Image: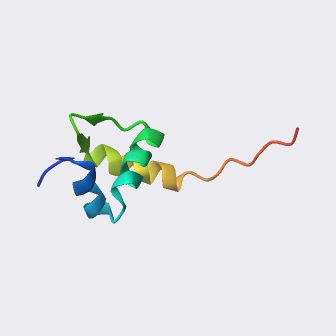
Amino acid sequence: MAIHLTPTELAEEVNMKRREVIAKCMEMGVPIFNGRIDKTLFLSSLRRVTQQPKQPQAAA
């Protein structure tokens, strides 16, 4: 079981498109090192982002 995957391999595993995986990495600060992404870090970061409740906007 590989931990460090290419964006294409990771996209197939998480049912996303390759470009979406790369965009999420950039958004969440998950590094892409030598063309590979740490699957565990990506999934835990994705869970954290999707589980965070949206912050209500403060009235000015």
Please provide percent x and percent y for residue 20.
Answer: 41, 54
| Quadrant location of the C terminus in the rendered image | top right
* Quarter of the view holding residue 26: top left
Taking the image as shown, residue 27 lies to the left or right of residue 22, namely: right
From the viewer's perspective, is 54 left or right of 42?
Answer: right
Q: Is residue 30 above or below residue 39?
A: above
Residue sitting at 86 percent across and 42 percent down?
Answer: 59
Q: Please say if 13 is above or below 36.
A: below
Query: Vertical placement of 50 versus 22: above or below?
Result: below
Residue at 34% across, 51% down: 43
x and y percentages locating residue 48 in the rendered image: 46, 49
Is 42 positioned to the left or the right of 26 in the image? left
- The picture places residue 3, in percent across and down from the top left corner, at 18, 47
- Residue farthest right in this picture: 60
Q: Of 29 and 59, which appears nearest the observer?
A: 29
Q: Nearer the viewer, residue 22 or 59?
A: 22
Measured from the top left, where is residue 56 in percent x and y? 74, 49
For the view shown, which residue lies furthest in the bottom direction? Answer: 15
